[in-house]
Amino acid sequence: MNFDTPRGACLSFLTPNQPRKLISRFSEYARGAKSLFRISLLVAVLVLTGADASHAQRVAKYGADFLAGGVGARALGMGGAYISVADDVYAGFWNPAGLTGVSSREVSYMHAERFSGIVSFDYAGFAVPFSERSVLGVTLIRSGVNDIKNTLDAWDSERDQPLPNPESAITTFSAADYALFVGYGKRLSDALSFGVSSKIIRRSIGDFATAWGYSMDVGVRYVSPVWQLGLNVQDVTTMLQSWSVDSGRLANIRDVFEDDLPEGGTELVLPVVRMGASRLFDVRPGTIRVSMDMDVAFDGASANQISAGSMNLHPRLGAELVVSDLVSFRAGFNRIQVVDGEGLDITPSLGTGFRWGRAAVDYGFGDFAGLVSDLGYSHRISAHYRFSE
């Protein structure tokens, strides 16, 4: 065997321009990673500043929990592991930086029935490019329980018994939450994007109590030929919710509260850091995408997370198989938690989708309360249409 190979012969298979291209691509990745680190550091400072300023305030552990389920049957079929994947109109909710993937006007709609139809959830989204590097997205959400029986006026508090004809005094009301997102995505380079979203929350419990909330989300997204990285900080400025309660409407049940009727006030929703990574694999005759998200919250809520003091972690996993850019099959885990006395509890989700031209319809099937729960399963159907370039 002859080992007297001339120096540099191991690169003889490269053309004269290929080393230069490799160095250029590596430099581009390095610049993108450096920019992503700088933006992430700035976002972290904003989060810590908002958290420190809220220590003297009343913190709501589940102040915007109706948004935790996410939007889009594709995303939910992948277990909600969508922070780095979102590059269409749904990015207005998941990560505003992903709006830069929108190249023409897009609209979307989703309807879901949760907890065996008890909770109705509706979502609508719209995105339109301003230029080759900037996109505007609008998201509308309503989640509510309808036709709740109101029997307060059917009770005679003086006689401490129902009215002679109580059915005529029974009315219905809804407990509903609304959200409006107005997002803007800006492409900083071919690989790196930045986004910000202003958010308004409206919550109501009939005419008994109402609340308004305001905050802002900030996100970044980095895309390489095979990897996608995403970071979205929800309520980076800390959401301020102001409640107003009509105590007069609750006067008939004062004894239930022992003269301590609920009162209005202000509460804070602390930021949640949502990080994600995904990778795309080419297979015949399509592609496979694998993604993972990790939510980091600081409000001390530990009902369905992995907790460590006041910080809790919420991991998600998802995968998607796309065949011939026509049919998709999805699966994921949208909740991985440790239950005291029970151990590890994992909640799966499944989904499928069909794409024809610029239109797509997706279906997601999941369970929000555990496989043995009596609350049942959830079905989500969403439609997405992309207008011509």
Image (spheres, rainbow, N blue to C red):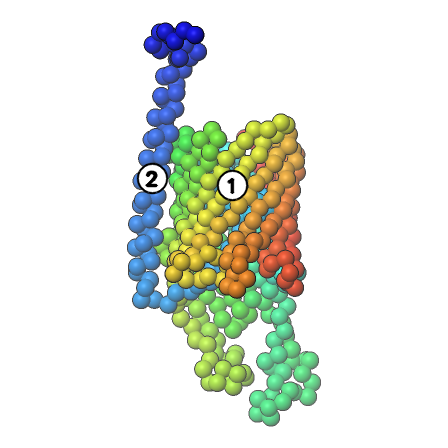
Q: Position of residue 153 (x, y in %)?
A: 60, 81
Q: Which sits in the foreground, 72 or 123?
A: 72
Give the quarter of the figure containing the C terminus.
top right
Instruction: Determine the residue positioned at 53% across, 83% down.
Output: 256
Secondary structure under badge 1?
strand
Secondary structure under badge 2?
helix
Examine the rendered structure and indicate whether residue 341 appears above or below residue 158: above
Provide the residue designation for mark 1: 291
Q: Position of residue 207 (x, y in %)?
A: 53, 71
Give the quarter of the figure containing the N terminus.
top left
Examine the rendered structure and indicate whether residue 352 appears above or below residue 5: below
Give the side of residue 167 with respect to residue 205, left or right: right
Provide the residue designation for mark 2: 37
Of the residues shown, which amino acid type is indicated by label 1?
A: Ser
Examine the rendered structure and indicate whether residue 21 appears above or below residue 273: above
Q: Which sits in the foreground, 8 or 316?
A: 8
Of the residues shown, which amino acid type is indicated by label 2?
A: Phe
Q: CA distance from mark 1 to mark 2?
A: 21 Å
Q: Which sits in the foreground, 352 or 94?
A: 352
